[in-house]
């Protein structure tokens, strides 16, 4: 648990959040959007999406403390900020209201086509774009005709673009004059669309558009959120069915690199790039301890494990709300709105990913013990990892693999101690060379280290035999011998069968073989054929993983 916030961080390989993370229970029962003002260090959260109740825009600071509440006589929905963060735009049923973000005073109210489904707002191309849809009952909003509007010279007017369902809007990258529009699955459209518009002129001009279903109708878009990368080259889409889609912004085709899948059982709900372009946050709704939020490098080729959060219970919600993620401009803070309970409770989380990454390296060579490695017996591979910067808040983890004639074998993770040392435990099961590769994949604070390798020659495990008998025996009473057999390493698939040979003054010959009992003991009984010294020798030939063994005993035989 982190700083009393109720935020649970998932187990390795996930990194861990900073101790300064904060969480606030929001005094709202619905949620429609948030905007982050990095100039004044404020977060604006709109609560009432539709209905007849009075709405509120909540204002929090970057430490998670409530600063103000901006009440409205009727429902509010979307919020948007101008690019200079000087003006806050709030959607009402019949107006778009503006506020001075410095004073939090209302500066204007602009009449708009009446909306009963929750007005979406997005600031792009120097103006505010909004949606409106009018129905008699809220359940009709899912399939209502929704229009795209623009606020120009103090007047909200329709652009002529419209489609079915609660159309979602998102701005393109800052300064790129691009607006994104998406159609949710609940619209009933067989193949919902995603589109981008050039909004540099007086009227929006559609550029790229894409529908995702294949010829069999599979793979249709289930849109929950979308965000443009800060450099304007990519668009990330939160698809509840497909997870996170990364698209080329120019034509909305699949980007060559894609992010790893969300954890099993997690449905994508939100996505946001940090303002500095370093990170991407991917929100989800998942049960139990399955992570609901991944914070990772924005480069899908970066193999650094993500920072993972699992939101559980009444202290932090049960998952990230749709469109519930936003970053500060410098990437120093991520704001996440979570929901839980009956779906009418909401929380604001303030998360501070590390701003600096430190170098790491393996020092010295790997060593192993015991020095004579044998198949089927424990082997320890030891090494040391060194890191720059302050000591990690939680122990680092290294991963290891063994490569032998049978392929590559994953050995899991090993914890790095405070002094940097670690021990990888293994039990090689094949004779020959085994090459161990140890990796540190990094986390949000530490960069990956260059892999280190070590080759171990694995030999056969020894087998051993003991044989005891009397000093003297008689030909009439015979010879009774006892012995034990042991084989180190991997257990034998079945009980060992031993050869028995007798050597006397008449020559050497084989006797009946004996099978070793479950406890490793065996007996040999023989009637000697002649007097004087008789030597008995038992032997085991060994197998692919064990060396052979012999043992002998000499008995003086009398008549």
Image (cartoon, helix red, strand yellow):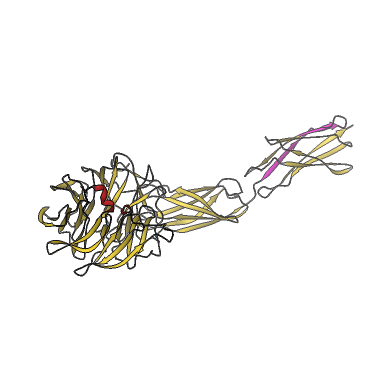
Q: In the rendered structure, does residue 474 fall within the stretch colored magenta? A: yes
Instruction: Give the residues in magenta.
Output: 461-481
Residue nearest the viewer, comparing 245 with 417:
245
Most distant residue in the bottom direction? 201
Quadrant location of residue 154? bottom left
Residue 430 falls left or right of residue 557: left
Residue 434 falls left or right of residue 209: right
Residue shown at 68% from the left, 44% from the top = 463
Give the percent coordinates (x, y) of residue 96: 15, 56
Residue nearest the viewer, comparing 51 with 392:
51
Quadrant showing the C terminus: top right
Residue nearest the viewer, comparing 103 with 449:
103
Give the percent coordinates (x, y) of residue 32: 23, 50
Give the percent coordinates (x, y) of residue 439: 46, 55
Residue 438 falls left or right of residue 158: right
Give the percent coordinates (x, y) of residue 148: 22, 60
Most distant residue in the top direction? 477
Quadrant location of residue 510? top right
Q: In the rendered structure, does residue 304 fall within the stretch colored magenta? A: no
Residue shown at 23% from the left, 45% from the top = 30
Quadrant showing the N terminus: top left
523 up-or-down from 212: above or below: above
Badge count: 0
- Asked whether the viewer can see residue 1, the reply is yes
- Asked whether the viewer can see residue 316, the reply is no
62 up-or-down from 152: above or below: above
């Amino acid at each position: 648990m982190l700083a009393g916030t109720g935020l649970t961080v998932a187990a390795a390989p996930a990194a861990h959040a900073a101790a300064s993370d904060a969480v606030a229970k929001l005094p709202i029962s619905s949620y429609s959007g948030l905007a982050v003002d990095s100039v004044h260090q404020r977060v604006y959260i709109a609560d009432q999406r539709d209905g007849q109740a009075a709405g509120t825009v909540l204002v929090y600071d970057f430490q998670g403390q409530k600063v103000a509440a901006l009440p409205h006589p009727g429902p509010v929905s979307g919020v948007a900020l101008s690019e200079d963060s000087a003006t806050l735009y709030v959607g009402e049923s019949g107006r778009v209201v503006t506020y001075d973000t410095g004073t939090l005073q209302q500066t204007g109210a602009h009449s708009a086509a009446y909306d009963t489904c929750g007005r979406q707002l997005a600031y792009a191309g120097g103006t505010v774009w909004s949606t409106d849809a009018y129905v008699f009952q809220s359940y009709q909003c899912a399939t209502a005709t929704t229009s795209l509007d623009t606020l120009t010279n103090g007047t909200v007017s329709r652009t002529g673009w419209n489609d079915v369902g609660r159309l979602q809007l998102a701005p393109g990258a800052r300064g790129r004059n691009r607006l994104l529009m998406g159609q949710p699955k609940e619209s009933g459209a067989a193949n919902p669309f995603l589109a981008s518009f050039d909004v540099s002129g007086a009227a929006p001009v559609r550029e790229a558009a894409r529908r995702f279903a294949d010829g069999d109708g599979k793979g249709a878009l289930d849109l929950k959120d979308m965000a443009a990368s800060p450099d304007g080259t990519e668009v990330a889409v939160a698809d509840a069915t497909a997870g996170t889609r990364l698209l080329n912004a120019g034509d909305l085709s699949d980007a060559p690199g894609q992010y790893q899948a969300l954890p099993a059982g997690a449905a994508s709900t939100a996505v946001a790039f940090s303002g500095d372009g370093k990170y991407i946050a991917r929100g989800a709704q998942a049960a139990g301890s399955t992570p609901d939020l991944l914070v990772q490098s924005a480069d899908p080729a970066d193999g650094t494990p993500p920072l993972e959060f699992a939101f559980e219970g009444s202290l932090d919600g049960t998952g990230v709300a749709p469109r519930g993620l936003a970053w500060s401009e410098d990437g120093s803070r991520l704001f996440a709105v979570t929901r839980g309970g009956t779906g009418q409770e909401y929380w604001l989380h303030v998360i501070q990913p590390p701003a600096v990454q430190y170098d790491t390296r393996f020092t010295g060579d790997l060593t192993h013990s015991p020095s004579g490695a044998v198949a089927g017996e424990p082997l320890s591979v030891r090494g040391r990892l060194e890191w720059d910067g302050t000591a990690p808040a939680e122990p680092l983890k290294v991963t290891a693999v063994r490569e032998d004639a049978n392929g590559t074998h994953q050995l899991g993770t090993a914890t790095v101690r405070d002094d940097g040392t670690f021990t990888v435990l293994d039990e090689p099961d094949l004779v020959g060379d085994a090459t161990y590769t140890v990796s540190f994949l990094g986390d949000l604070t530490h960069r990956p280290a260059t892999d280190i390798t070590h080759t171990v020659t694995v030999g056969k495990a020894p087998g051993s035999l003991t044989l005891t008998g009397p000093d003297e025996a008689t030909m009439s009473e015979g010879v009774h011998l006892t012995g034990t057999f042991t084989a180190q390493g991997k257990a034998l698939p079945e009980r060992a069968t031993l050869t028995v040979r007798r050597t006397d003054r008449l020559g050497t010959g084989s006797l009946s073989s004996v099978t070793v009992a479950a406890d490793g003991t065996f007996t040999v009984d023989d009637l000697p054929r002649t007097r004087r010294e008789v030597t008995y020798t038992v032997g085991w030939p060994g197998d692919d993983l064990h060396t052979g063994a012999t043992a002998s005993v000499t008995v003086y035989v009398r008549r």
